Image (spheres, grey):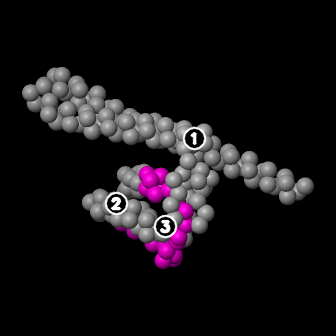
Amino acid sequence: LRFKRRLAQAEARSLRELDLAKTRLYTNISHEFRTPITVILGMARQVREQPEKWFRQGLDMITENSRRLLRLVNQMLDLSKLEAGAMEAQLQQGDVIAYLRYLVEPFQWHAQTKNIQLEFHTSEKELWMDFDPEKLGHICSNLLSNAIKFTPGGGPVFRDGKKRISRSVERIRNFIIRTGILGGG
């Protein structure tokens, strides 16, 4: 009886944490919409006021930020499908450590341009398991982009794989595991 009660409490706590993480995710996504919308509106105004000066650059920026908005909408739709159980993970057997190194590598140059130290260390040489490369890549790209965006110059972003970087990352890790983006190996 005591075990069942502890299990129920742990599940309830887990659900509360997941709800909180989802709320934060929706809040962050909403904030992510602001930037491209602001750019689109600003460029549209510039093109309207001085078309000869801003037409080409304005059109390019409006197009780029419209694509960014479309990606955000697609992410939200994917999240809804995932929550409804309508989106299944496309698991593949592979070395997730090698894949994570592959994902981190392009961000290292970007971090260097901002004087940020981006490293990926782990005690594991390789870890073979089932995972969804597309979804894991998407999540890692978003995490690394935000980490670089919100880290002051000179700061580390991604250090030792053994250390718990933050409670937010731990919640995201739990969400990834619960939703099946990473499968058992």
Mark yes or no: residue 92 visible. Answer: yes
Mark yes or no: residue 173 visible. Answer: no
**For numbered disc 2, what is the local secondary structure?**
helix
User: What label does residue 171 carry, if any?
Assistant: none
Q: Nearer the viewer, residue 36 or 181?
A: 181
Residue carrying label 3: 94
Left or right of 18, for residue 55: left
Q: Position of residue 112 (x, y in %)?
A: 29, 63
Label whose residue precedes the other's in the sequence (1 or 3): 1
**Mark 2 closeness class: few <14, some 14–19, many ≥20 residues within 10 Å:** some
Label whose residue precedes the other's in the sequence (3 or 2): 3
Query: Mark 1 and mark 3: span between their CA atoms?
Result: 24 Å
Label whose residue precedes the other's in the sequence (2 or 1): 1
Q: Amino acid at mark 1?
A: Ala
Q: Which residues are magenta?
A: 115-139
**For numbered disc 3, what is the local secondary structure?**
strand
156 up-or-down from 149: above or below: below
Q: Farthest right residue? A: 1
Residue carrying label 2: 107
Q: Residue at x 58, y 46 (%)?
A: 21
